[in-house]
Amino acid sequence: MFESRTASRAEISRATRLSKPTVNAAVELLIEQGYRTEDPGLASPSRPGRRPRLLRFESGLGYVLGIDIGANKVLVLVADLAGHVLATERRSTGAPETAALIALVEDAASRSVEAAGIPAGSLKAGDQLPTVRQLAVDLAINPNTVVRAYRELEIREVLATQQGTGTFITDKKPAKNDVERQRRVAQLAGELLARAGAEGITLQELLDWFTELQNEKKGRS
């Protein structure tokens, strides 16, 4: 649908191999929530017979963040709901440890969102988030995924859950200098690991060398 910007229900059914009733139910839900519009005037008049009603996304209602993690690279893409690519970010990764890779991906995603001009701060301290079940239904994802995301944000003290009341945004904000420092560290670490990997140098060899340098420095002091 993104290639042509519009599609009929029959075309979506053929492309996804879903039954027409399933497609109709999904389309009606998206129209009800305002994510799609259906307009017979969009159809091509060249075909004989009844013109199909074509669907298109309301591009300004949301964004899609795509992350492709490969063996040696991370590619992040931000697009609107009409499929227009707003920003991309590509990073070399080498073979980093999980923590370094997560930090690199978070930094690339953050910079992509910023480059796309997507406004931040739509949620403020004290705002209540949907329940796990409600958010899972709204996003059509597994509730366990929501549970893990909420738990991670609670560990970082971004969210706080009050028993019997709900989950809320906290007023804890990391210092800007700390955020920028973490981004820079992630970027430098990713670049170092990528160059080391290209030379056949393992992470353990780097760590051993850093440890040796640190011990030498301590010996001189």
Image: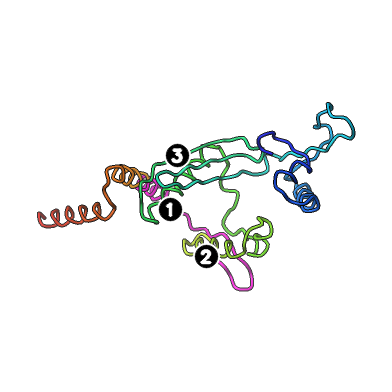
Task: State the image quarter where residue 39 is shown.
Answer: top right
Q: Earlier in the sequence, mark 2 or mark 1?
A: 1
User: What x and y, as percent, mark residue 179?
Assistant: 41, 49
Give yes or no for residue 62 being in the magenta stretch: no
User: What x and y, as percent, mark residue 128?
Assistant: 63, 61
Dot 1: within a 10 Å radius of its alpha carbon, few (fewer than 14), some, or many (20 or more) residues?
Answer: few
Q: Disc 2 designates what residue?
A: 151
Determine the secondary structure under disc 3: strand
**Residues at discs 2 and 3 in contact (Cβ within 8 Å):** no
**Residues at discs 2 and 1 in contact (Cβ within 8 Å):** no
Give yes or no for residue 184 being in the magenta stretch: yes
Asked if residue 173 is positioned above or below residue 40 in the image, the reply reads below
Q: Residue at x 57, y 65 (%)?
A: 147
Q: Which residues are magenta?
A: 161-186
Q: Earlier in the sequence, mark 3 or mark 1?
A: 3
Q: Which numbered mark, 2 or 1, is in the foreground of this view?
A: 1
